[in-house]
Amino acid sequence: MITPKYHLFVCGGGKLMGDKKGLCCTRGGQDLARKLMDEIEDRELSGQVMLSVSSCFGVCDKGPVVAVYPEGVWYGNVSVGKVGELFDRHIEGGKPVESLMI
Ligand code: FES
């Protein structure tokens, strides 16, 4: 059984209870998911870091949203440009990026 050190969830939610504002997928969520996967591969973290696309977290106005477990840290307004910092500081550095936390 594979036991990753971190499990990342990126929101791929389309809508929450019919409310169409602030949807992660319309705010770059798909590009973000691709970038997260590329980052895992580029840093050779496959097996240590797992990525899943989730449904809506219910905080659409904060999207795109990424959650990092086992800590249960949620990040909001995560852009493709913030992925490197997220990996440097949290995934490889062990310290959450407070400026992105929601
Ligand atoms: S669509 Fe991402 S939090 Fe709702």
Image (spheres, rainbow, N blue to C red):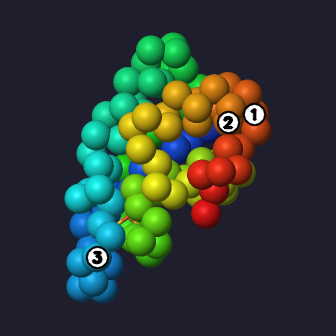
Residue at 67% from the left image edge and 36% from the top image edge: 90
Q: Is residue 24 above or below residue 43?
A: below
Label ID, residue 90: 2
Vertical order, 30 against 101 (above or below)? above
| Location of residue 74 in the rendering, given as x and y in whole percent from the top left corner | 59, 57
What amino acid is at disc 3?
Lys
Q: Mark 3 or mark 2, which is nearer the start of the sequence? A: 3
Say which element carries label 2: helix
Q: Is mark 2 within 8 Å of ligand 1?
A: no
Badge 2 amino acid: His
Assess mark 1: CB under 8 A from ligand 1? no
Q: Residue at x 43, y 34 (%)?
A: 81
Mark sitting on residue 58: none
Q: Amino acid at mark 1?
A: Gly
The residue indicated by pointer 1 is 94
Q: Is residue 102 left or right of residue 30?
A: right
Q: Quadrant of residue 55?
A: bottom left
Image point 54% across, 20% down: which residue?
A: 45
Disc on res. 21: 3
Asked if the residue at tag 1 contacts the one at tag 2, i.e. Cβ–Cβ closer than 8 Å, the answer is yes
Task: Tell me the SS state at disc 1.
Answer: loop
